[in-house]
Amino acid sequence: MIEPDAFSAATVFERHKRIVVHNDTHSAARQSSNVTHELAHGLLLHPPAPALDTATGCRAWNADHEDEANWLTGELLVTREMALAVARGKVARDDAMDRLGVSQQMLQWRINATGAAQRAARENGSSR
């Protein structure tokens, strides 16, 4: 059975070159996130590593590298300023998602990660 969501993206190394391979059956917003995540690994100079653990046959995973790449992906796709503008209600969520080419999940993650919702709530509460 083919599972179209089983693979998102990966970086393939050929000596000093990096090639990003991604799943083009995902939504455009998901593809953007997937490719940006792989580019983040490159920007962070994460070294090449085997995709599979030879002992277990399972996917090899460096949690620190993945966390770093996830964080940078969000920073690159949704600026702190946009997250705050959405949280303040100055930009509609759908408009932000369309303008940035991101999913609702990515936008919400950045609003949470930046503390934009809390900041907007404090500002709203202090203006009363």
Image: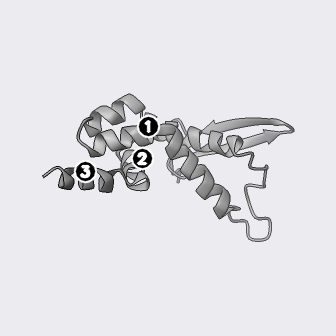
Q: Is residue 26 above or below residue 111?
A: above
Nearer to us of marks 3 and 1 is: 3
| Mark 2 touches mark 3? (CB < 8 Å) | no
Q: Amino acid at mark 2?
A: Met
**SS type, badge 2:** helix
Q: First in sequence: mark 2 or mark 3?
A: 2
Q: First in sequence: mark 2 or mark 1?
A: 1
Name which residue lies at 43% across and 43% down: 80
**SS type, badge 3:** helix
Name which residue lies at 35% across and 45% down: 104
The residue most toward the bottom is: 56
Q: Amino acid at mark 3?
A: Glu
Marks 2/3: CA distance?
24 Å
| Side of 71 where 118 appears, left or right | left
Instruction: Point out which mark residue 106 bears.
Output: 2
Residue matched to label 3: 123
Name which residue lies at 53% across and 39% down: 76
| Side of 61 where 119 appears, left or right | left
Q: Quadrant of residue 61?
A: bottom right
Residue 37 drawn at (x, y percent):
58, 44
